[in-house]
Image (spheres, rainbow, N blue to C red):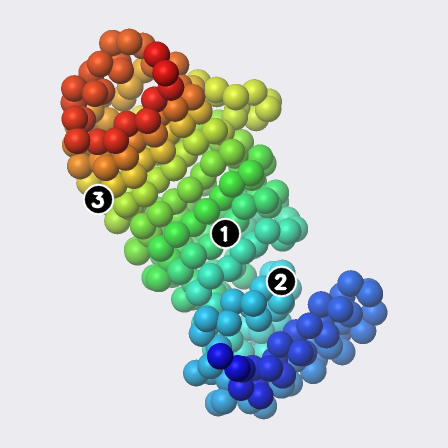
Protein backbone atom coordinates (compact mmCIF):
# COMPACT_ATOMS: atom_id res chain seq x y z
CA UNK A 1 0.00 0.00 0.00
CA UNK A 2 1.40 3.38 -1.01
CA UNK A 3 2.07 6.01 1.63
CA UNK A 4 0.21 9.29 1.77
CA UNK A 5 2.25 12.41 0.96
CA UNK A 6 2.31 13.39 4.64
CA UNK A 7 3.64 10.02 5.79
CA UNK A 8 6.18 9.93 2.96
CA UNK A 9 7.45 13.36 3.98
CA UNK A 10 7.67 12.31 7.62
CA UNK A 11 9.86 9.38 6.57
CA UNK A 12 12.06 11.65 4.48
CA UNK A 13 12.58 14.12 7.32
CA UNK A 14 13.27 11.34 9.83
CA UNK A 15 15.87 9.92 7.43
CA UNK A 16 17.50 13.34 7.25
CA UNK A 17 17.85 13.34 11.04
CA UNK A 18 19.50 9.93 10.97
CA UNK A 19 21.88 10.98 8.20
CA UNK A 20 22.81 14.18 10.00
CA UNK A 21 23.47 12.32 13.23
CA UNK A 22 25.75 9.85 11.51
CA UNK A 23 27.62 12.74 9.91
CA UNK A 24 27.64 14.56 13.26
CA UNK A 25 26.56 17.72 11.49
CA UNK A 26 23.26 19.56 11.15
CA UNK A 27 21.18 17.28 13.36
CA UNK A 28 19.60 20.14 15.32
CA UNK A 29 18.30 21.76 12.16
CA UNK A 30 16.99 18.43 10.91
CA UNK A 31 15.18 17.88 14.23
CA UNK A 32 13.61 21.36 14.04
CA UNK A 33 12.34 20.72 10.51
CA UNK A 34 10.80 17.41 11.56
CA UNK A 35 9.12 18.90 14.64
CA UNK A 36 7.76 21.84 12.62
CA UNK A 37 6.36 19.44 10.02
CA UNK A 38 4.61 17.35 12.67
CA UNK A 39 3.09 20.46 14.21
CA UNK A 40 1.88 21.79 10.88
CA UNK A 41 0.36 18.51 9.70
CA UNK A 42 -0.95 16.99 12.92
CA UNK A 43 -4.55 16.72 11.72
CA UNK A 44 -3.53 14.78 8.61
CA UNK A 45 -0.87 12.65 10.30
CA UNK A 46 -2.67 11.64 13.48
CA UNK A 47 -5.02 9.02 11.96
CA UNK A 48 -2.27 7.66 9.67
CA UNK A 49 0.57 7.03 12.09
CA UNK A 50 -0.58 3.85 13.82
CA UNK A 51 1.45 0.89 12.63
CA UNK A 52 4.25 2.92 11.02
CA UNK A 53 6.91 1.04 12.99
CA UNK A 54 9.71 1.85 10.55
CA UNK A 55 9.09 5.55 11.09
CA UNK A 56 9.20 5.18 14.86
CA UNK A 57 12.42 3.16 14.59
CA UNK A 58 13.93 6.20 12.88
CA UNK A 59 12.53 8.76 15.30
CA UNK A 60 12.53 8.71 18.30
CA UNK A 61 15.83 6.88 18.72
CA UNK A 62 16.70 8.05 22.24
CA UNK A 63 15.20 9.46 25.40
CA UNK A 64 16.22 12.90 24.10
CA UNK A 65 13.93 12.49 21.09
CA UNK A 66 11.00 11.42 23.24
CA UNK A 67 11.49 14.38 25.54
CA UNK A 68 11.73 16.69 22.53
CA UNK A 69 8.42 15.40 21.15
CA UNK A 70 6.67 15.70 24.51
CA UNK A 71 8.03 19.18 25.22
CA UNK A 72 7.00 20.28 21.72
CA UNK A 73 3.37 19.37 22.38
CA UNK A 74 3.49 16.34 20.06
CA UNK A 75 2.16 13.69 22.41
CA UNK A 76 -0.10 12.50 19.58
CA UNK A 77 2.99 11.12 17.83
CA UNK A 78 4.17 9.25 20.93
CA UNK A 79 0.66 7.90 21.48
CA UNK A 80 0.77 6.13 18.10
CA UNK A 81 3.79 4.00 19.04
CA UNK A 82 2.65 0.45 19.79
CA UNK A 83 5.90 -1.50 19.37
CA UNK A 84 9.34 -0.20 20.18
CA UNK A 85 12.89 -1.44 20.68
CA UNK A 86 15.32 0.33 22.99
CA UNK A 87 18.35 -1.59 21.73
CA UNK A 88 21.33 0.75 21.64
CA UNK A 89 19.93 3.21 24.16
CA UNK A 90 22.56 4.60 26.52
CA UNK A 91 22.30 4.83 30.28
CA UNK A 92 22.24 2.42 33.19
CA UNK A 93 18.51 2.54 33.83
CA UNK A 94 15.28 2.70 31.91
CA UNK A 95 14.69 6.44 31.44
CA UNK A 96 11.37 7.93 32.60
CA UNK A 97 10.77 9.22 29.06
CA UNK A 98 10.02 5.63 28.03
CA UNK A 99 6.74 5.88 29.91
CA UNK A 100 5.61 8.79 27.74
CA UNK A 101 4.83 6.20 25.05
CA UNK A 102 1.49 5.64 26.73
CA UNK A 103 -0.03 3.21 24.22
CA UNK A 104 2.92 0.90 23.76
CA UNK A 105 1.90 -2.78 23.48
CA UNK A 106 5.27 -4.50 22.99
CA UNK A 107 8.58 -3.25 24.39
CA UNK A 108 12.02 -4.69 23.62
CA UNK A 109 14.75 -3.82 26.12
CA UNK A 110 17.23 -6.38 24.77
CA UNK A 111 20.87 -5.48 24.20
CA UNK A 112 20.88 -2.54 26.60
CA UNK A 113 23.07 -1.83 29.63
CA UNK A 114 20.24 -1.15 32.06
CA UNK A 115 20.85 -2.04 35.67
CA UNK A 116 17.27 -1.12 36.49
CA UNK A 117 14.09 -1.31 34.43
CA UNK A 118 11.80 0.00 37.18
CA UNK A 119 9.26 2.69 36.40
CA UNK A 120 5.66 3.79 36.07
CA UNK A 121 4.33 0.63 34.40
CA UNK A 122 0.88 1.20 35.89
CA UNK A 123 0.47 4.06 33.39
CA UNK A 124 1.12 1.75 30.42
CA UNK A 125 -2.39 0.36 30.31
CA UNK A 126 -1.93 -1.38 26.94
CA UNK A 127 1.47 -2.97 27.54
CA UNK A 128 1.14 -6.71 26.86
CA UNK A 129 4.71 -7.87 26.29
CA UNK A 130 8.15 -6.98 27.61
CA UNK A 131 11.29 -8.67 26.32
CA UNK A 132 14.72 -8.22 27.92
CA UNK A 133 17.41 -10.53 26.57
CA UNK A 134 21.19 -10.22 26.89
CA UNK A 135 20.98 -7.42 29.43
CA UNK A 136 23.95 -8.64 31.46
CA UNK A 137 23.89 -5.58 33.73
CA UNK A 138 20.38 -6.39 35.00
CA UNK A 139 21.00 -7.96 38.42
CA UNK A 140 17.52 -7.74 39.90
CA UNK A 141 14.07 -6.31 39.21
CA UNK A 142 13.38 -3.24 41.31
CA UNK A 143 9.92 -1.94 42.15
CA UNK A 144 7.81 -0.64 40.60
CA UNK A 145 8.26 -3.51 38.16
CA UNK A 146 6.58 -4.55 34.93
CA UNK A 147 4.20 -6.61 37.07
CA UNK A 148 2.34 -3.33 37.66
CA UNK A 149 1.31 -3.10 33.99
CA UNK A 150 -2.42 -3.93 34.13
CA UNK A 151 -2.60 -5.79 30.79
CA UNK A 152 0.77 -7.58 30.78
CA UNK A 153 0.57 -11.05 29.23
CA UNK A 154 4.14 -12.02 28.27
CA UNK A 155 7.42 -11.36 30.08
CA UNK A 156 10.74 -12.66 28.78
CA UNK A 157 13.93 -12.10 30.79
CA UNK A 158 16.53 -14.39 29.28
CA UNK A 159 20.33 -14.37 29.31
CA UNK A 160 20.51 -11.56 31.86
CA UNK A 161 22.51 -11.04 35.02
CA UNK A 162 19.76 -11.74 37.53
CA UNK A 163 21.09 -12.78 40.91
CA UNK A 164 17.73 -13.52 42.54
CA UNK A 165 14.47 -14.75 41.12
CA UNK A 166 12.09 -11.78 40.59
CA UNK A 167 9.36 -12.71 43.01
CA UNK A 168 7.44 -9.48 42.40
CA UNK A 169 6.34 -10.91 39.05
CA UNK A 170 3.91 -13.10 40.98
CA UNK A 171 1.72 -9.98 41.22
CA UNK A 172 1.23 -10.03 37.44
CA UNK A 173 -1.88 -12.21 37.58
CA UNK A 174 -2.71 -11.45 33.94
CA UNK A 175 0.46 -13.27 32.77
CA UNK A 176 0.04 -16.02 30.18
CA UNK A 177 3.72 -16.56 29.32
CA UNK A 178 6.76 -16.10 31.55
CA UNK A 179 10.37 -16.98 30.79
CA UNK A 180 13.26 -16.46 33.21
CA UNK A 181 15.96 -18.52 31.54
CA UNK A 182 19.71 -18.87 31.06
CA UNK A 183 20.60 -16.14 33.50
CA UNK A 184 23.95 -16.04 35.31
CA UNK A 185 25.13 -14.91 38.71
CA UNK A 186 27.01 -11.80 37.64
CA UNK A 187 30.31 -13.62 37.27
CA UNK A 188 29.57 -14.92 33.77
CA UNK A 189 29.02 -18.36 35.27
CA UNK A 190 25.92 -20.26 34.34
CA UNK A 191 23.71 -21.78 37.01
CA UNK A 192 23.43 -19.10 39.67
CA UNK A 193 21.71 -21.56 42.03
CA UNK A 194 18.38 -19.81 41.88
CA UNK A 195 15.77 -20.71 44.43
CA UNK A 196 12.24 -20.26 43.10
CA UNK A 197 10.33 -18.54 45.91
CA UNK A 198 6.98 -19.93 46.99
CA UNK A 199 3.97 -18.27 45.41
CA UNK A 200 4.42 -18.96 41.72
CA UNK A 201 1.08 -20.81 41.68
CA UNK A 202 -0.60 -17.40 42.06
CA UNK A 203 -0.13 -17.08 38.29
CA UNK A 204 -3.32 -18.94 37.49
CA UNK A 205 -3.57 -17.70 33.89
CA UNK A 206 -0.06 -18.85 32.99
CA UNK A 207 0.08 -21.20 30.02
CA UNK A 208 3.81 -21.22 29.22
CA UNK A 209 6.55 -21.14 31.88
CA UNK A 210 10.25 -21.13 30.99
CA UNK A 211 12.74 -21.77 33.78
CA UNK A 212 15.57 -23.17 31.69
CA UNK A 213 19.24 -23.02 32.64
CA UNK A 214 18.95 -21.19 35.96
CA UNK A 215 20.40 -23.85 38.25
CA UNK A 216 17.24 -25.25 39.82
CA UNK A 217 18.14 -28.24 41.99
CA UNK A 218 14.91 -28.51 43.98
CA UNK A 219 11.40 -27.99 42.69
CA UNK A 220 9.30 -25.37 44.46
CA UNK A 221 6.33 -27.30 45.92
CA UNK A 222 3.66 -25.07 44.42
CA UNK A 223 5.02 -25.65 40.91
CA UNK A 224 3.49 -29.12 41.19
CA UNK A 225 0.08 -27.47 41.72
CA UNK A 226 0.11 -25.67 38.36
CA UNK A 227 -1.97 -28.20 36.46
CA UNK A 228 -3.18 -25.48 34.10
CA UNK A 229 0.25 -25.09 32.47
CA UNK A 230 0.44 -26.09 28.82
CA UNK A 231 4.26 -25.97 28.52
CA UNK A 232 6.96 -26.03 31.19
CA UNK A 233 10.62 -25.71 30.15
CA UNK A 234 13.10 -26.94 32.76
CA UNK A 235 15.97 -27.84 30.47
CA UNK A 236 19.46 -27.07 31.74
CA UNK A 237 18.60 -27.72 35.40
CA UNK A 238 20.05 -30.48 37.58
CA UNK A 239 16.85 -32.12 38.80
CA UNK A 240 16.93 -35.37 40.70
CA UNK A 241 15.29 -38.54 39.45
CA UNK A 242 12.72 -38.21 42.22
CA UNK A 243 11.82 -34.63 41.28
CA UNK A 244 11.42 -35.62 37.65
CA UNK A 245 9.04 -38.40 38.62
CA UNK A 246 6.99 -36.15 40.90
CA UNK A 247 6.77 -33.51 38.20
CA UNK A 248 5.56 -35.90 35.53
CA UNK A 249 3.01 -37.41 37.90
CA UNK A 250 1.66 -34.06 39.08
CA UNK A 251 1.39 -32.44 35.62
CA UNK A 252 0.30 -35.22 33.26
CA UNK A 253 -1.31 -32.83 30.76
CA UNK A 254 1.61 -30.39 30.58
CA UNK A 255 4.31 -30.56 27.93
CA UNK A 256 7.44 -30.71 30.11
CA UNK A 257 10.85 -30.09 28.56
CA UNK A 258 13.69 -31.77 30.44
CA UNK A 259 17.25 -32.73 29.65
CA UNK A 260 17.76 -36.44 28.95
CA UNK A 261 18.16 -38.37 32.19
* The C terminus: image quadrant: top left
Which of disc 1 and disc 2 is earlier in sequence?
2
Marks 2/1: CA–CA distance: 13 Å
**To which quarter of the image does residue 219 belong?**
top left
Marks 3/1: CA–CA distance: 23 Å
Q: Is residue 217 above or below residue 103?
A: above
**To which quarter of the image does residue 198 belong?**
top left
Query: How far across and how far down the image is residue 138, in percent?
Result: 53, 37
Q: Residue at x 41, y 34 (%)?
A: 180
Check disc 2: other Cα within 10 Å, few if <14, some if 14-19, many if 20+. Answer: some
Q: Residue at x 69, y 75 (%)?
A: 31
Marks 3/2: CA–CA distance: 35 Å
| Count of numbered marks | 3
The residue where tag 3 is placed is 205
Which of disc 2 and disc 3 is earlier in sequence?
2
**Which secondary structure, mark 2?**
loop
123 and 108: which is toward the camera: 108
**To which quarter of the image does residue 234 belong?**
top left
Residue 207: give its label.
Answer: none
Instruction: Judge whether residue 78 can be spotted in this image.
Output: no
Check disc 1: other Cα within 10 Å, few if <14, some if 14-19, many if 20+. Answer: some
Query: How far across and how far down the image is residue 59, in percent?
Result: 61, 68
**Which secondary structure, mark 3?**
loop
35 and 249: which is toward the camera: 249
Query: How far across and how far down the image is residue 4, in percent?
Result: 53, 86
The residue where tag 1 is placed is 108
Q: Residue at x 26, y 14 (%)?
A: 243
Residue 61: give its label.
Answer: 2
User: Left of 246 or right of it: where is 35?
Assistant: right
Query: How far across and how far down the image is residue 223, in percent?
Result: 24, 26
187 and 44: which is toward the camera: 44
Amino acid sequence: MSRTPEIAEAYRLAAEIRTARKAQSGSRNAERHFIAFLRGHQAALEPQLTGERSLFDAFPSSWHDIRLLADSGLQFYLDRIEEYSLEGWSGDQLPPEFFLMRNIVTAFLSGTNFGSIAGDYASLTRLEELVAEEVWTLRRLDDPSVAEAPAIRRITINACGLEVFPRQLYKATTLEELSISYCHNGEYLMYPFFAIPAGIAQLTRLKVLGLAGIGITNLPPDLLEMTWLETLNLMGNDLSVGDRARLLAALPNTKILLDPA
